[in-house]
Amino acid sequence: MPISYNEQLRVFRLDTPRTTYLMGLVGSENFLGHIYYGPTVPDDNMGYLLRLEERPFTPDANAGERASFYDCFPFEYPAWGGGNFRQPCLRLRTAQGGPNCELFYDGHRIISGKPGLEGLPAAYGDNCATLEITLRDPVLDVKIRLLYTVFEDVDAICRSARIENAGGEAVGLDAALSACLELDNEDFDLITLHGSWAREQNMDRRPLASGKQGAFSLRGISSHQFHPFLALCEHTATQERGVVYGMNLVYSGNFLAQAEVDQFNKVRAVLGIHPDGFSWKLEPGQSFQTPETVLVCSDAGLGGMSRAYHDFFREHLIRGQKKHRPSLLNSWEACYFDFDHDKLLQLGREAARYGIELLVVDDGWFGKRDDETTSLGDWQVNEKKLPGGLKRLGEELAAMGVKLGIWMEPEMISPDSDLYRAHPDYAMTIPGRTPTQARSQLVLDLTRKEVRDCIYDQISAVLRSAPIRYLKWDMNRPLIDVYSSALPPDRQGEAAHRYVLGLYELQGRLVDDFPDLLLENCCSGGGRFDAGMLYYSPQIWTSDNAEAVDRLVIQEGTSLIYPLSAMGAHVAACPSHVNGRITPFEVRGRVSLPGCFGYELDIDKLSPEEQTLIPEQLEEYRQYGPVFREGDCYRLASYRENHTYDAIMAVSKDKKTAVVSFVQVRSRAYRRSLRLKLTGLEETALYRRKDTDEVRSGAGWMWGGLLMEAVQSDYLTALTVLERV
Ligand code: DGJ
């Protein structure tokens, strides 16, 4: 049983295949405290993990004087009040204005399976069990239902909290985070991801310092700047060694990911919706559900944590269209807004010539849109550009064996649009203030059902009008004027979260009504590449920067958490439209291979030599793409760290095939060959290297390594394939 309760010790125990999570009830008051999270410990006598004898840990030992207790107790779900001066997960406001709250155990139950979370993306699975612990504030009669789900097949634990007002008066929530993890600071480093547009998901690793540190977003989206994630790892942890804890939020809006080191050198790590600008009013009988946090612990280094997250997302979060990721040709960098039916057919013929499966018509096919300034919200095809509409285009492409995909930006409205002229109130604006435009557009008030319905009707009409197999759902600005005309003043603090809930409802309807549609989310590249969006779309456009060298870094950061099957990766035009760099076609192809592969250029403008490489690239994608996307990934070398070369390896789950993708970005004067130590193979099995026929045992390849010859040249790449004999 992966979940149990030891009545004698009053300890809850959760077991994943390789980890244990323990919580206990403490004192006569029944505080719920964190005891242990880490590699599996035996179930013999967990008493040694409790520090019951230690003052001021136990309130009883303090003769009822709670201040020092609150100051150091490792709460499972800390609330503001009682002397808890560290970051709370919960902060309440009563009609009288008092923020104090104290939470005591009120009961628990163990449920087989996993309940869904109302209105929110959430993990699923049959092979799992859920522990629900109820905490209660006896004065306010507010109840917190903490959910912990444990899966049999992955080392991940899902946590969330539901706050219920069981009392007779309204209560305001000023903070309602999803999860808290309290650990002794064992010389930890903190890892977060940071960046900007076109420079997403850079890994930041630094020693934990006293006080608060972490990542956040207040942009209404999970953002390019930070990611709703943090990891704590032993200072000595490497790719494949050392203990690492990860916390990832299944959410796409404002968040706080924070680690706080206190006076006793303990860490309180919290994750959830950012309390700034957030409030939520709970009338008697109402409840609030927080998004879900996915906890992972691995003693196999950063790679171990990544593989646990990859398995978890593939098996328990991503839905539909799990395996096949069609190769595609996207019109954006090929011709931007400058296209008509004939131009798209020409791109379609290019795709057909090479067997590329899908042509994606990016921005510019609707309304009067020839640039960024107009027509968002008017989702009717521009018949001047596309006579016969998407239907004719789709049918002509189908006759060539190419499927049709389109771009939309459904959350937005251009002030220059028929929709805005008819319904200016559909845009989020603050009364009395000039609406803040970004990319010449405003944000639709998705908190309102009539606005969602209006957009949904348009989207579904477009999708039903033509044989459309793929939709790129874009979003190109942050939320700034966060105000909904449909909410009363004392509920305006709910607008940002209600927007995200509206977005989820829209995308949920879409995937339910169009189960065969492949949805790819995008947010000016990776501005909303998060687990919340992954629940609706199995792949996400990783970054507008598809230049190969920068992409190595962006993809390394992204794959720290997300499986390669989630990453849109295209061979883009050269010199790069984003950073001006010239990188060989071969290298651009190799860097894109592990993700959801495509081209984002006009193939006819490539040199004949470059064109001859396309069939090879597509064949590699067909043969080895599935190993990267579905197998176990190992990072062998990081260009981000060594500034010279990069190598990732994937091993199929049955351990029959292994592929190593190597890119030498820069040559280095006077060096010897490189030995890339492989990993993840079966030690005693024999593996044949495909290009040389060399046969060695798995151990031979892992310890002896793959020798990469010292070639004095920038931009070299190699794909090495090993097959089990
Ligand atoms: C931003 C996206 O990230 C690009 O790929 C492209 O679709 C443009 N928007 C179109 O406006």
Image (tube, helix red, strand yellow):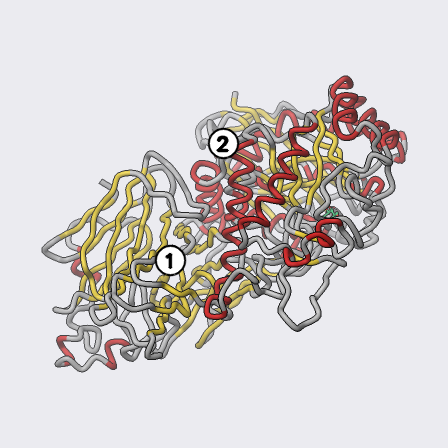
Residue 206, given in percent of the width and then of the height, sits at 53, 67
Vertical side of 602 occupied by 715: above or below: below
User: Badge 1 is on which residue?
Assistant: 288
Single out the residue that lies furthest toward the top: 399
Vertical side of 276 occupied by 544: above or below: above
User: Badge 2 is on which residue?
Assistant: 698
Single out the residue that lies furthest toward the left: 8
Q: Of callouts 2 and 1, which one flags the residue occurring earlier in the amino acid sequence?
A: 1
Vertical side of 418 occupied by 344: above or below: above
Secondary structure of residue under mark 1? strand
- Identify the residue at image location x=19%, y=59%: 106
Image position of 220 (left or right of 362)? left
Image position of 92 (left or right of 665)? left
- Identify the residue at image location x=74%, y=54%: 421
Nearer-the-camera pick, 132 or 482: 482
- Identify the residue at image location x=70%, y=66%: 436
Residue 190 visible in the picture? no
Q: Is mark 2 within 8 Å of ligand 1?
A: no
Residue 30, given in percent of the width and then of the height, sits at 17, 65
Where is residue 584, by image quadrant?
Answer: top right
- Identify the residue at image location x=27%, y=64%: 142
Nearest-to-viewer mark from 2 and 1 = 1
Residue 205 visible in the picture? yes
Q: Quadrant of the N terminus?
A: top left
Counting labels gives 2
Secondary structure of residue under mark 2? helix
Marks 2 & 1, CB-CB < 8 Å contact: no
Q: CA distance from mark 2 to mark 1?
A: 52 Å
